[in-house]
Image (cartoon, rainbow, N blue to C red):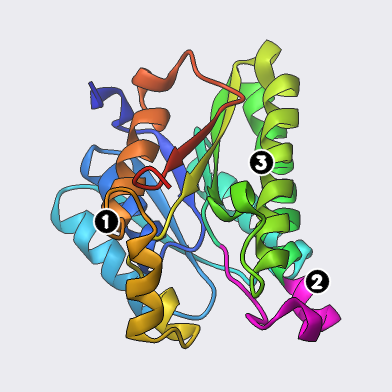
């Protein structure tokens, strides 16, 4: 089912760990030529590349701070110049800045959260759209969050709003891309077992309490998201666009 991915030029942002790393590794294992983007975790990104190449795949390293839109555009241009085009863009990079009660939220945390989770993905997608339009099509997959469904928590309202904006961008780009065979979809991840939770200072109790609210009673794994990306990036997803898929254990 996924053999057509062989040789596809795929850029995955935020691919040095967690969900992004798993997406890059899985697509690379099926023969895609993967651009592994990172901002600061070069060691993690190199480990991802090593895993891909050991399985016979191809991968190259790309660095860029997506809080700077000029860097985001340069990243896309660099990938295209190196690869000769782009077949799939996976806008995975994301983070929550200022996980505090919304009454205490500062403007910079709001701005940075929106920039990384909505603004940068839009400009990356826009530049990829230009290339895909000329080459006869392509796929853009945005990694959203179930936070968009619920509006986030009292501490992540701005993150939920940013991911809602990303879902709206998905729908708009899908409509614009249909006549050019540019397919655009979102994948809303649920509570996924990644290093992000400890980075944000969430306790074991907080994590267990959150998991109890999930109908399947377990956290998702990065592979759960990666498999959905694999499906959409492959020929199996060739008649799907403008959709928002939730991978959240029933959440």
Picture quadrant where residue 156 is located: bottom right
Residue 32 in the image: above or below residue 43: above
Numbered disc in front, either 1 or 2: 1
Picture quadrant where residue 227 is located: top left
Stretch in magenta: 94-112
* Residue at image location 67% in from the left, 35% down from the top: 170
Q: Which residue is mark 2?
A: 111
* Residue at image location 41% in from the left, 79% down from the top: 206
154, 56: nearer the viewer = 154
46, 216: nearer the viewer = 216
Distance from the alpha carbon under mark 2 to that under mark 3: 18 Å
State whether residue 200 appears in this view: yes
Q: Which residue is mark 3?
A: 167
Measured from the top left, where is residue 193 in percent x and y? 32, 66
Measured from the top left, where is residue 139 in percent x and y? 53, 30
Among all residues in the image, which is located at the extreme left? 55
Q: Residues within 10 Å of mark 1 (few under 14, many from 20)?
A: some
Secondary element type, mark 3: helix
């Amino acid at each position: 089912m996924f053999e057509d991915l062989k040789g596809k030029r795929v850029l995955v942002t935020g691919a040095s760990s967690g969900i992004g790393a798993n997406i890059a590794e899985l697509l690379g294992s099926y023969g895609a030529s993967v651009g592994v983007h990172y901002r600061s975790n070069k060691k993690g990104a190199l480990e991802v590349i090593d895993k891909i190449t050991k399985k016979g795949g191809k991968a190259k390293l790309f660095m860029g701070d997506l809080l700077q839109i000029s860097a985001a555009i340069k990243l896309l241009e660099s990938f295209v110049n190196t690869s000769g085009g782009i077949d799939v863009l996976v806008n995975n990079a994301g983070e929550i800045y200022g996980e505090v009660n919304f009454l205490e939220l500062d403007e910079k945390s709001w701005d940075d959260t929106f920039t990384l989770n909505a603004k940068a993905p839009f400009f990356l997608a826009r530049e990829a759209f230009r290339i895909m339009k000329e080459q006869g099509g392509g796929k853009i997959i945005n990694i959203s969050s179930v936070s968009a469904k619920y509006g986030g928590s009292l501490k992540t309202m701005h993150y939920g709003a940013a991911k809602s904006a990303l879902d709206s961008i998905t729908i708009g780009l899908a409509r614009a891309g249909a006549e050019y065979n540019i397919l655009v979809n979102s994948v809303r991840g649920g509570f996924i077992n990644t290093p992000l939770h400890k980075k944000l200072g969430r306790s074991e109790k907080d994590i267990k309490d959150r998991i109890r609210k999930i109908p399947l009673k377990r956290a998702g794994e990065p592979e759960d998201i990666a498999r959905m990306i694999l499906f959409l990036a492959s020929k199996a997803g060739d008649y799907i666009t403008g959709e928002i898929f939730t991978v959240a254990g029933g959440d």
